Amino acid sequence: MARGLLNALRSIFRALKQERLIFHVPTAGLKAPAAVDLPRPLSSDRLAGALDRLDGPRSRLIIGLVAIHAIHAVEVSRLLLTDVNLKNRTIAARRGLHVHIVYLDDLSTRLVADWLRERRTRWPRATNPHLLVTAQTYRHPGSPQISYTGMRSAFDQIGLLPRQLWTDRVLDEARETADPICLVRLFGIHPRVAVKYVHTAHPDKALPRIH
């Protein structure tokens, strides 16, 4: 919007100068700020009953981990069985060399347990070490992670993209805490991202720049 307005003003002032009504263009030295892609929340009606609209434990776990704990969908697809510790109610999400520990609430623990039960029942001889497997991957010699199509089908059922769910979760927490450090600890995100979300949720608050 700011860039479009500035361009319009420049055109107007150039026209006035050609008509000799002004002698210089006051917008000549101005630059429009770079566009900022601010996070946008989802409407409550799009999230209401989302888990109930899914077709099974695997889809519910995928959506739950993204929507509740803001684990990126690609990270969910890479999870191994050994990353899950139901006794301590944790999941270790790998991000390069960094491992972010996710602490499961009651709902998330139930979603994980339901899927593990389903996995053991359907594929008791599975050899694939990944947490999420399908009929095509559970005994595949290459032990591949679940495909993009397999992951995407869960999101298609509720009509939302993974990024939308992730963004909404982080933004919701930012509204509650207004503390970027809390977001960094809870979701394992970069401080700059945390500040961006808190600023979006609380535009009236002055926050320090994080380089």
Image (cartoon, rainbow, N blue to C red):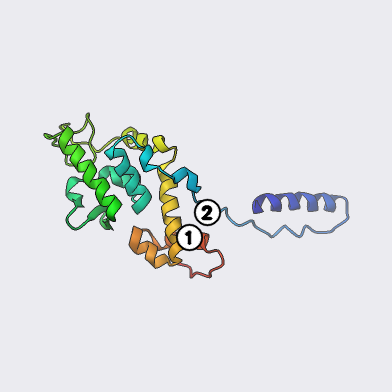
Q: Position of residue 178 (x, y in %)?
A: 46, 66
Q: Position of residue 184 (x, y in %)?
A: 37, 62
Residue 89's quadrant in the figure? bottom left
Residue 96 in sight: no
For marks 2 and 1, the one nearer the N-term is 2
Q: Which residue is mark 2?
A: 38
> At 44% across and 51% down in the image, what residue appears?
167
> At 28% across and 39% down in the image, what residue appears?
58
> At 20% across and 50% down in the image, what residue appears?
84
Numbered-mark total = 2
Determine the secondary structure under disc 2: loop
Bin the neighbour count of mark 1 within 10 Å (Cα to Cα): few under 14, some 14-19, many 20 and up.
Answer: many
Determine the secondary structure under disc 1: helix
Name the residue nearer the viewer: 19 or 160: 160
Bin the neighbour count of mark 2 within 10 Å (Cα to Cα): few under 14, some 14-19, many 20 and up.
Answer: few
Position above or below: 158 against 28: above
Position above or below: 27 against 55: below
Q: Position of residue 75 (x, y in %)?
A: 30, 47
Amino acid type of the residue tagged 2 in the rendering? Leu
Residue 2 lies left or right of residue 9; in this view the side is left
Q: Position of residue 149 (x, y in %)?
A: 34, 33
Name the residue nearer the viewer: 35 or 26: 35
Q: CA distance from mark 2 to mark 1?
A: 8 Å
Residue 106's quadrant in the figure? bottom left
Residue 185 lies left or right of residue 140; in this view the side is right
Residue 64 lies left or right of residue 1; in this view the side is left
Whether pointer 2 and pointer 1 mark residues with C-beta atoms closer than 8 Å, the reply is yes
Amino acid type of the residue tagged 1 in the rendering? Lys
> At 39% across and 62% down in the image, what residue appears?
183
Instruction: Tell me the quarter of the image containing the C terminus.
Output: bottom left
User: Any mark on residue 196, and which?
Assistant: 1
